[in-house]
Amino acid sequence: MTSGDRDEITVVLAEDQTMVLEAFAALLGLQPDITVLATVTNGPDALTSVTEHDPDVLVTDIEMPGTSGLDVAAELHRRGSRTGVLIVTTFARSGYLRRALNAGVSGYLLKDSPISELADALRKIRAGEKVISKELALAAWDHTDDQLTDRERQLLREVAEGSSNRDIARRLHLAEGTVRNYLSTAMAKLHARNRTDAAKIARERGWI
């Protein structure tokens, strides 16, 4: 593609499930106006690939190794990148949608959407439009505001991954008592029975 050929939509795909990634790449490759420049399987590589290829759109899942798709979107937004970000995920949760919009994404679709809908979304995003699946647009009206702090979300993500308070304290260079205090506050906000329950509730709401 030459720099003057603006009828072609260039895309980078980020997805940690190889079969899904290859299916997306193959199906989008059949579209005459869409070119997949690169495929990656984690967040850090997604950032690197966008920097290297400067695509029109990054298509990314939310949960990936290294850096989540939402964090990648937020970093690209912070950098002022021209690349639009389309989240394609299984998570039909208003909490994730709100976080995605706050991160500056251009679109949010579910993985069970037809490939034609994904292709149309890429075209709309290239044209400067926002795209949100109808199911999520309706769900966005039924939500509980996220009251967690960034630190509480960080610790709950660690809990969700099976880390003990001691492990979390060592990894994040915090006192173990400080970790307990943060988690206790998060548990109170979520009306959770224990730290594991708090992480489960936060994940179900799309807050972590």
Image (cartoon, helix red, strand yellow):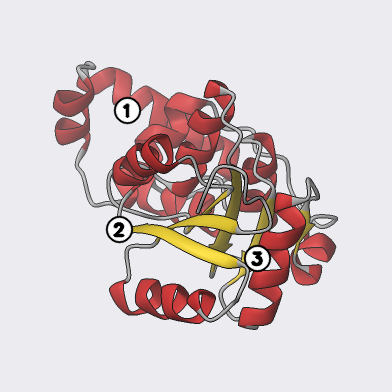
Q: Determine if residue 129 is in view.
A: yes
Decide: is 87 above or below 19.
above
Residue 154 at x, y percent in the picture: 39, 33
Crowd tier of the residue under label 3, counting other residues whose Cα lies within 10 Å: few below 14, some 14–19, many 20 or above? many
Q: CA distance from mark 1 to mark 2?
A: 33 Å
Q: Residue 1 or 194: which is nearer the viewer?
A: 1
Q: Is residue 109 above or below residue 29?
A: above
The residue under label 3 is which amino acid type?
Leu
Task: Judge whether 100 appears above or below 30 on screen.
Answer: above
Task: Give the distance between the C-alpha atoms of the residues marked 3 and 1, in whole angstroms.
Answer: 37 Å
| Camera-nearest label, 3 or 1 | 3
Residue bearing the label numbered 2:
41
Task: Please rate how many residues cluster around mark 1, counting C-alpha atoms within 10 Å: few if below 14, some from 14 to 19, many from 20.
Answer: some
Q: Residue at x 31, y 40 (%)?
A: 44
According to the picture, the residue beneath numbered tag 3 turns out to be: 109
Q: Nearer the viewer, mark 1 or mark 2?
A: 2
Of the residues shown, which amino acid type is indicated by label 2?
Answer: Thr
Position of residue 113 measured from the top left corner of the image (x, y, whole percent)? 64, 79
The answer to whether the residues at label 3 and label 2 have Cβ atoms under 8 Å apart is no
Q: Position of residue 159 (x, y in %)?
A: 31, 45
Residue annotated with mark 1: 180
Instruction: Give the side of residue 92 with respect to residue 44, left or right.
Output: right
